[in-house]
Amino acid sequence: MNQTGQTQDELKTLVAQAALSYVVPGEYLGVGTGSTVNKFIDALAASGIAIKAAVSSSVASTQRMQSLGLPVVELTQVERMAVYIDGADEIDGHGFMVKGGGAALTREKIVAAQADRFVCIADASKRVEVLGSFPLPVEVIPMAAPQLVRQFKALGGQAGLRMAHGKPLVTDNGQHVLDVVGLRITDPLGFENAVSQWPGVVTVGVFAHQKANVCLLGTSQGVQTTVYD
């Protein structure tokens, strides 16, 4: 709880409401995944803003939007979106992010790449000076996981397979996720470029090429807006 008595949950609600002002009526809207995005979906449904349709980055977000009566279409039906709204596990002062805590990083990166603008919504705990405090998610082809663990070890990181209900977590794409700790990512663009080339990596959770254009950060002083472009 921060100095004003607001919980992390309440800060997420604040930024979710603030993100409504970035929704373009009558246009396609990209929607991410996670607890903060869930609050945005709820706020969007209650707002009455008429969008053409939403493009979702995960099965979970699709189901939530459909249950609230929001129209959802496949990305294959859309050439571009005005805006993509999603959370982050970490975001630095340049708009570079670590994402994938909800295991939807691949679809998030694909959807974000087709949006004109990426609006990141997060609470103040997600703001960092250097990426790497949050375990870095990497979606991988299962047979490559042991070798990728060794490659991250050579970089000084410790990679572990993400588990769910006693079994390796399976993403919406049918793959596994490694979570890597012990990294200090001082060059997000270079890191994303390098790791993306490793055989067996589907997507690395560093969002440098698809970085945030705007960050709405929930703080004890209210919503702090940072524009990076």
Image (cartoon, rainbow, N blue to C red):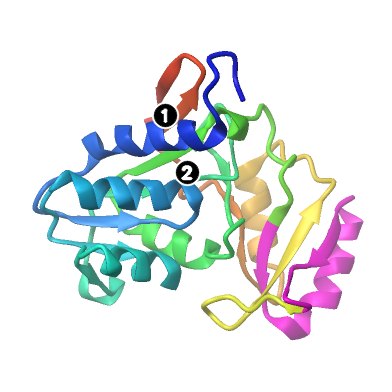
* Numbered-mark total: 2
- State which quadrant residue 174 falls in: bottom right
Check disc 1 and report its element: helix, strand or loop: loop
Q: Residue 152: horizontal and vertical position, in percent?
A: 83, 59
Number of residues whose C-alpha sits closer than 10 Å to that of mark 1, classed few (under 14), some (14–19) or many (20 or more): few
Based on the displayed image, in which of its 4 quarters is residue 159 positioned? bottom right
Residue 165 is inside the magenta segment: yes
Q: Amino acid at mark 1?
A: Tyr
Image mark for residue 70: none
Residue type of the residue flagged with mark 2: Lys
Q: Residues within 10 Å of mark 2 (few under 14, many from 20)?
A: many
Query: Could you tell me which quadrant the N terminus lies in?
Result: top right
Residue numbers of the magenta segment: 137-166
Asked whether residue 115 is in view, the answer is yes
Residue nearest the viewer, comparing 89 with 39: 39
Q: Earlier in the sequence, mark 1 or mark 2?
A: 2
Q: CA distance from mark 1 to mark 2?
A: 9 Å
Q: Is residue 82 visible?
A: no
Instruction: Identify the residue at image location x=74%, y=68%.
Output: 162
Looking at the image, residue 11 sits to the left or right of residue 84; the answer is right
In the displayed structure image, the side of residue 185 where residue 215 appears, left or right? left
Residue shown at 23% from the left, 53% from the top: 45
- Image spot of residue 177 (x, y percent): 69, 69
Q: Is residue 54 above or below residue 212?
A: below
Q: Is residue 138 magenta?
A: yes
C-beta proximity under 8 Å, tags 1 and 2: yes
Quickly name the residue at label 1: 228
Residue pushed farthest front?
Answer: 5
Placement of 225 over or under 101, stated as above or below: above
Q: Which mark is residue 211?
A: 2
Picture coordinates of residue 155, whole percent (x, y): 86, 52
The residue located at (74%, 50%) in the rendering is 135
